[in-house]
Amino acid sequence: MSRRVRRKVARKGKDKVVLPSYPELEDEGSSLDQKVVVDWTRLPDDTVIQLFTCLNYRDRASLSSTCRTWRVLGISPCLWQSLDLRPHKCDATTTASLASRCVNLQKLRFRGAESADAIISLKARGLREISGDYCRKISDATLSVIAARHEALESLQLGPDFCERISSDAIKAIAICCPKLRKLRLSGIRDVDGEAINALAKHCWNLTDIGFIDCLNVDEIALGNVLSVQFLSVAGTTNMKWVLVSQHWGKLPNLTGLDVSRTDVVPTVLRLLSSSRSLKVLCALNCPALEEDSSFSNNKGKSLLALFTDIFKGLASLFVDISKQERNIFSDWRNLKKKDKNLDEIMNWLEWILSHSLLRIAESNPQGLDNFWLSQGAALLLSLMQSSQEDVQERAATGLATFVVIDDENASIDGGRAEAVMKDGGICLLLNLARSWREGLQSEAAKAIANLSVNTNVAKAVAEEGGINILANLARSMNRLVAEEAAGGLWNLSVGEEHKGAIAEAGGVKALVDLIFKWSTGGDGVLERAAGALANLAADDKCSMEVAVVGGVHALVMLARNCKFEGVQEQVQYFIKIDARSIKKHWAHSTLQRLAARALANLAAHGDSNSNNAAVGRETGALEALVQLTRSPHEGVRQEAAGALWNLSFDDRNREAIAAAGGVEALVRCSLSRA
């Protein structure tokens, strides 16, 4: 093989400077482990910036701190046009430190009222899009100030949870302060009165997309005055006066898409609305009154999307030149060489409202939808996962994670639905999303993989497609939500004996142990999943040794000791006094205790095959913690702790220590309680 060398030439003024070059291919027989020094500082600026775009914000900040050149490149305006603050704790101090980078910020996503208060400090006056999650505590005052500071705003979305403290006053402020508004989607507002809607009609002449979703009351007559509206959703909104809807909305001159999903709309209203000349799409998913009328049919040439219709066929009817394979309608549309702006707007809107309604339907899990989910629901969610809209991708992945679950308490999933996801290529799609640098996608994809992996066939497919390595990597994430969902995936996969070794080989054992140390406080969900996975893995001889080697014994003992211990009578009084939230928190503690005890029991269960039995006994506080757990008010915790003490007692060095810690009495007490 000939040696081939590529020489790098850098220009400096008019002169060419030959930089050091390195061989692309070595001669046969040359040493493969020859050390080559690469000077990263000589990478072209555009290459470094491209590298930054592949990283999350935390990693970008870390990379920027390595040298002065990369610090300058790290604040390039092109890297700060979009910002997702949802995975991070965002307060005024955080946003103040980001302010210098956000001068050209155009798109912002945040989570919670604290972040909403803080984003005012970003001083991003050119913001065009704002999207907020978990907005229950956001007040009128905060939203009004946000609107006043961002007069260039074109899109405002708050949801999908309810915005309970936002009223029509805030909507009026938005209308007055943001005249360029094109899209307004708000969820769970109690009352949207006529004065607020008329303010939107008066000041926001470009407002084409309105969503008042899951609201209690919306003024139907006033909505008929927003002549600019093209896409309107009142999905899940109650107390609608449908007579007024049919009288006023059918006259809207530009109304192209209407979403009345999850409402009590009746066929008569839809027939009247179908007479609109501009209307092209009616979305009415999960509308009981509509579905009960078997005689209802849409004969006005409109595309009706409902649970009893072929949704893919309805979408395909919007196109003239499109593939006859209607199931591919979304991919065919995305791959069209000749784009139609109007159709693109319709399809983007449909992606959004379909993902939203399918998730809401999956969450409520109404009876009688098995056929829908198997015939087209799963395929729709998989198609939406490939959307160019990140929030649509996230909701579709969450929908997959949700619709397969039929029993939360017992972690039971519907085998048919899981198989449908796998059959349509869903595992590869989810794993590809999990590889994204976007932590929101990582979290939701990992959640779906975890839930689906309860099914043994899906678990096998996940392992074969490299999912164990992906989940092990995600478990190392600095983002608690990502790490939690990844640990859940490893927990479910660790049930299968054939996957335990692969988890250990991928570094999953160490990642799980590290999670216990990293989130020892304030992360019950992470701890439960990590402890559950380690308990399963510890049942395997080789994996149990790996658990001990990477510090798992210390981590599990710490987990068992740090949970609160009270006597039975004290616990009864405690339960009487505390509220529902505290009960849930205490139940989480008992679950952690049970899982930690089970993991320690499994570690000590291998007898003479490894040294874990003695190692657990020598761990400071381990025996005392297990004895304390035998006094738990929860039978599961008591039995797991007793099992651990029983296994440990087979080592001669542990017996005296167990007796000294009161373990004999504890074991007797547990055996009597079982009898």
Image (cartoon, rainbow, N blue to C red):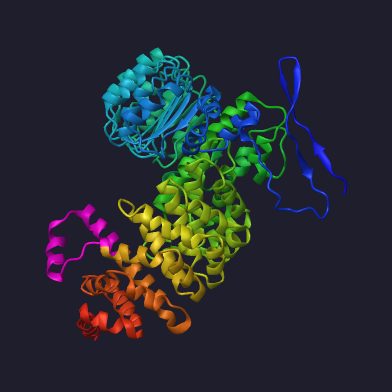
Q: What range is drawn magenta here?
A: 562-591
Rendered location of residue 488, percent (x, y)? 44, 58
Specify the quadrant that holds the C terminus. bottom left
Q: Is residue 55 above or below residue 555?
A: above
Q: Residue furthest right?
A: 2
Q: Nearer the viewer, residue 566 or 310?
A: 566
Rendered location of residue 647, percent (x, y)? 35, 81
What residue is shown at x 53% (from left), y 32% (from top)?
349
Q: Is residue 217 above or below residue 378?
A: above
**Count of marks overlaid on the render:** 0
Residue 18 in sight in this render = yes
What residue is shown at x 42% (from left), y 39% (from top)?
266
Q: Is residue 187 above or below residue 498?
A: above
Indicate yes or no whether the magenta region holds residue 590: yes
Indicate yes or no whether the magenta region holds residue 581: yes
Q: Is residue 363 above or below residue 668?
A: above
